[in-house]
Every structure is written in C-alpha cells, then in structure tokens.
Amino acid sequence: MNDFISVRDLSAKEIVCLLDMANRFREDEYKISTQLFAANLFFEPSTRTKISFIVAEKKLGIEPLDFHAETSSMKKGESLYDTAKTFEAIGANVLVVRHEADDWDKELADKLSIPIINAGAGKKDHPTQSLLDADTIYQEFGRFSGLKIVIAGDIKHSRVARSNAEMLSKLGAQVYFSGAPEFMDESLGYPVLSFDEAVENCDVLMLLRIQHERHNEFVGATLDYHENFGLTIEREKRMKKHAIILHPGPVNRGIEIDSSLVECNRSKIFKQMENGVYVRMAVLTKQLLNWGIIDENKIEKCNSLEQRQYIRKVRTVN
Ligand code: CP
C-alpha cells in the first residue's frame, strides 16, 4: 500500500481528484463514523501544517494524539522506527510525520500496517503544502494551463519549491525560479528569471523565506536582500493587475516581502492557510480509504449544504 510521501508519486489525475475532494469538504460537513486516532509526529517546528492537520482530523471526527519529541522517549534514545511502531501498537490509525531528514520515510517504508503522511521532509518534499497552493491558485484562476508561476527565494534549501515545481508542472503551469544566484539550484532544471522580470510577467508570485535552519549562507544585510530580491512596494506596483502573491509561511516581513503587502488585496497568504485544512482532510480520507481502514459507508455527510443554507435562512428570518 502507498504512503503519501512525495508529489513524484502522484499523477495529475490523482492531484485533481484530491483538490475535488478538498472542495467537497469545504462545502459540506463530513464525519467518519468509527473511532480513529491520528499521531502527529513533528520533529521540526510547525504552526500551519501541524495545527491544520489537527483541525482536519477533528473536523473528520479523528482524535489527534498528543506527541512532543522533546518530552518523548526519543530523549532516551528511541528511534523514529520504534516510536512509529509504538504508536501503531497503541492504536494510531494514521501517522503524520515532519522531520528534518530528506529521506526519513525510508526508515518506515513497508514496515507499518497504517498509512504515513509526509508533513515535510528536510528540503525534499512538502506534498500537502503543494496541494493547498494548487487549491488556492485554482480558486483564483480556474485553471493551471498557461499560467506563469514564479517561485522566488531560497530555492536551493526549500522543500516547498521542489514539491510545488513538480506539482504545478504536472498540472500544466509554466514554472520558473527566481532569486539570489547563491540560492538557485540548476540541477532542478527549471528556467530562471531575474526578480524584476518575474514580478512583471508572472500570474502567480510565490515567495519563499530564507531557510536559515538548513544552511549558514546569507547574502548580506537584510535591507540589501529586500532591495535586491524582495517584493518591495515599488515592485508590487509593476505586477500584472490580476497577479497574486503566495507564501507558504512563516513570512519574514520586510525581507522577502514588504510588511504592508502581506495582507494586500493580491496576497492570498491567509487563504492558503485556510485551504490547508481542506486538502489535509482530503489526504487523510484518501489514505484511510486506500488502506482499507474505512470504507465509503463510514463517511457520513452530517450537514448538507441545502440544510445549512436553510438553517442560515431560518436564523436570518428570526
Ligand atoms: N508552510 C509551513 O509548512 O508552515 P509551518 O512550518 O508553520 O507548518
């Protein structure tokens, strides 16, 4: 059975299917009618991914299990494998893992009877981030084909850049990289634009922060970086009228983007976070179905759109 580890393992059809499922979860409430537990094993800091997985699990009726690496038995030398096996033995039905190693999944592959979902692997993969980015782009444009999408910033150390370039290309978009030369990675094979070309020609500008935790390089003073490779107020004015700004977060205000642009009209940064909940509900459900842990009959539509519209109408009238 397949774990959910990399965009490389997904076809365009499977990606579209997951986006469609996310949309259903956005429109209607569904619950899984059997007791399930999810272990969220985060070995790297996270706010958005961890909390949106917990919200996604709770919305589906799955109980999240509390885990903190720094107070767990890993402090006594327990391995990732033995930690995962322990959660499986105790009753977890799905594992969500974030780890600083690029290939942490190899330690667990084919050794567990429950599905594993990648919530971030070193600088290699962040598949659920790519799904929520694709979801946000589709909400704006209703298509991927023909869109010019620029991923700008610390490409070399970014799992978001790698997963997004792969997913958005599979969906038919034209993907470019941009940023300081020391942060480019030619081996990835995507065309590179100067930052000013990128800003003026893109439909989607996806900004990345400098991944200080993965390297010691820095291209000089913060102010210089912002002037040379950041979205300044002046550059934003040169973007196409319909172009949007994305950022996976956390944002370094005043470095890759001027603070006042984080919440400007063309910024969809907080929309991305909202969408993260629905795509993660879709991934959790798909994995539980694929592994035979639930079947379709266990997913109950508890509150149809028509019912909710009716309730809203009744409330308004009253
Ligand atoms: N985008 C993202 O992965 O954010 P967190 O590190 O806060 O989860």
Image: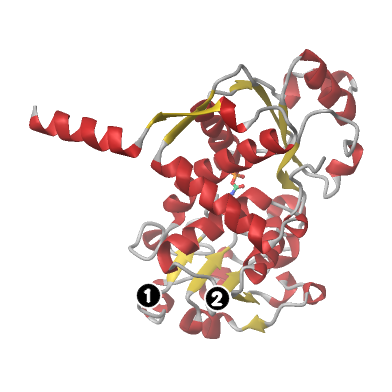
Which coloring applies here?
secondary structure
Residue 230 coordinates in the image, percent (x, y)? 52, 70
Is any atom of residue 79 visible in this view?
no
89 left or right of 20? Answer: right
**Which residue sits at x=39%, y=77%?**
234
- Residue reaching furthest to the front: 297
Find the distance from the CA under tag 2 to the CA under tag 1. 16 Å
Tell me if mark 1 has few (under 14), some (14-19) or many (20+) residues whose alpha carbon lies within 10 angstroms of its own.
few
Q: Earlier in the sequence, mark 2 or mark 1?
A: 2
Q: Which residue is mark 2?
A: 145
The amino acid type found where label 1 is placed reads His
Task: Tell me the number on the disc at residue 37.
Answer: none
The amino acid type found where label 2 is placed reads Ser
Residue 174 coordinates in the image, percent (x, y)? 61, 78
Dot 2: element: loop
124 left or right of 210? Answer: right
- Residue reaching furthest to the top: 90
Task: Tell me the number on the disc at residue 242.
Answer: 1
70 left or right of 74? Answer: left
Residue 76 coordinates in the image, percent (x, y)? 87, 18
**Residue 183, picture quadrant:** bottom right
Residue 258 coordinates in the image, percent (x, y)? 43, 64
Q: Look at the image and tell me in which quarter the C terminus lies.
A: top left
Tell me if mark 2 has few (under 14), some (14-19) or many (20+) residues whose alpha carbon lies within 10 angstroms of its own.
some
